[in-house]
């Protein structure tokens, strides 16, 4: 997986989402979160960025979500970012507020990533 440190932080955040703590209770659910991490880290590498979750900005996340990421993957990424931030307070306050905001993609009419 590309950007292993960033991916690890997201996946550590996802541990709070797995049953009995959260709503992920199937292999299919876990696959959605893995797909979201893979798509995001692949895009970051293609875009020429590397770093940690704490380096993410509102503009970067908006750019990624505006490109047409599936709403399910956007929701999964937001959930992992929230949980990772809850565990370690790694997001800047403006990024935290942005992650907690509304979805950009509210349907599955967008191209997958």
Image: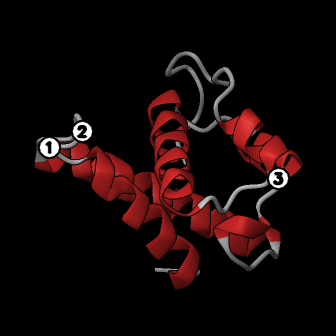
The residues bearing labels 1 and 2 have C-alpha atoms spaced at a distance of 5 Å
- Residue depth check, mark 1 versus mark 3: number of the one nearer the observer: 1
- The percent coordinates of residue 2 (x first, y second) are 54, 80
The residue where tag 2 is placed is: 22
Considering only order in the chain, which callout, 3 or 1, is on the residue closer to the N terminus?
A: 1
Given the current orientation, which residue lies at the most extreme right position?
59
Asked if disc 1 and disc 2 are in contact, CB closer than 8 Å, the reply is yes
The residue where tag 3 is placed is: 60
Q: Label 1 crowding class (10 Å Cα cut-off): few <14, some 14-19, many 20+?
A: few
Q: Is residue 63 visible?
A: no
- The percent coordinates of residue 40 (x first, y second) are 59, 59
Q: Secondary structure at mark 2?
A: loop
Residue under the image location 13 percent in, 50 percent down: 27
For the image shown, how many numbered marks are present on the structure?
Answer: 3
The residues bearing labels 1 and 3 have C-alpha atoms spaced at a distance of 30 Å
Asked if disc 1 and disc 3 are in contact, CB closer than 8 Å, the reply is no
Q: Secondary structure at mark 1?
A: loop
The residue where tag 1 is placed is: 19
Residue under the image location 73 percent in, 79 percent down: 51
């Amino acid at each position: 997986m590309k950007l292993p440190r960033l991916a690890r932080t997201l996946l550590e955040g996802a541990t709070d989402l797995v049953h009995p703590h959260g709503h992920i209770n199937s292999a299919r659910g876990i696959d959605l979160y893995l797909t979201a991490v893979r798509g995001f880290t692949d895009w970051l590498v293609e875009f020429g960025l590397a770093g940690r979750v704490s380096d993410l900005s509102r503009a970067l996340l908006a750019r990624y979500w505006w490109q047409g990421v599936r709403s399910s993957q956007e929701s999964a990424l937001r959930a992992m970012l929230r949980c990772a931030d809850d565990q370690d307070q790694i997001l800047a306050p403006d990024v935290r507020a942005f992650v907690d905001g509304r979805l950009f993609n509210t349907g599955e009419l967008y191209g997958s990533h």
